[in-house]
Amino acid sequence: MSRIAVIYATKTGHSEKLAKAVAQAVGCAAYNAVNISMPINADLLFLVGGIYAGKSHPEMIRFAESLGGSAGKKAVLITTSVSVSNRSQPDIRRILSEAGIKILDEHACAGSLLFLKSGHPDTEDIAEIVRRAIEIKNQFENPNP
């Protein structure tokens, strides 16, 4: 069985909520990027973070940068954002690509801020992210010939 880890960075708690649901579903631990001081020994990383004022969380960027020399690892990006037009993490994608880490997939869901999109990510958002994470884990552990 391969080693899998979920890493998250959050300001609002939404990414933590998603990360813990994914970790439970795929049978691994969820780590807060703020508290990581040593390398994560995993072949598949689920990176869960929000977009804040158009940028990835600084601690997620710091974590991604710490993965230099990790060629062969694979990653899945899970992003929350209030903005419909800004739900990707180009900075993280670039950093991972430069480190030789292949991005298998990227999923986004609504986050909320104050009264905007209140209640998101909701149970449907979480269920969809978890469903996809399980599919990716299964494909990763049992690749088709």
Image (cartoon, rainbow, N blue to C red):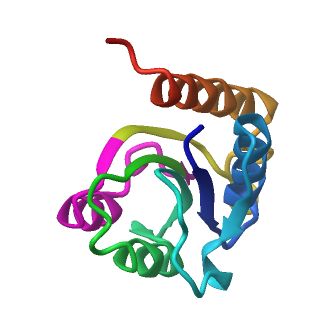
Residue 66 image-quadrant placement: bottom left
Q: Residue furthest left?
A: 98
Q: Is residue 134 left or right of residue 14?
A: left
In the rendering, at what x and y percent does residue 111 appear? Answer: 64, 50
Q: 132 above or below 7?
A: above
13 vs 24, nearest the viewer: 24
Q: Is residue 142 left or right of residue 55?
A: right
In the rendering, at what x and y percent does residue 59 appear? Answer: 52, 80
Is residue 89 covered in magenta?
Answer: yes
In the rendering, at what x and y percent does residue 46 appear? Answer: 54, 50
Residue at image position (77%, 51%) is: 20
Tally the marks: 0
Residue at image position (59%, 32%) is: 133
Q: 116 above or below 114?
A: above
Magenta region: 80-103
Is residue 57 covered in magenta?
Answer: no
In the rendering, at what x and y percent does residue 34 appear? Answer: 63, 82
Q: Residue furthest front?
A: 1
18 vs 3, nearest the viewer: 3
Q: 118 above or below 51?
A: above
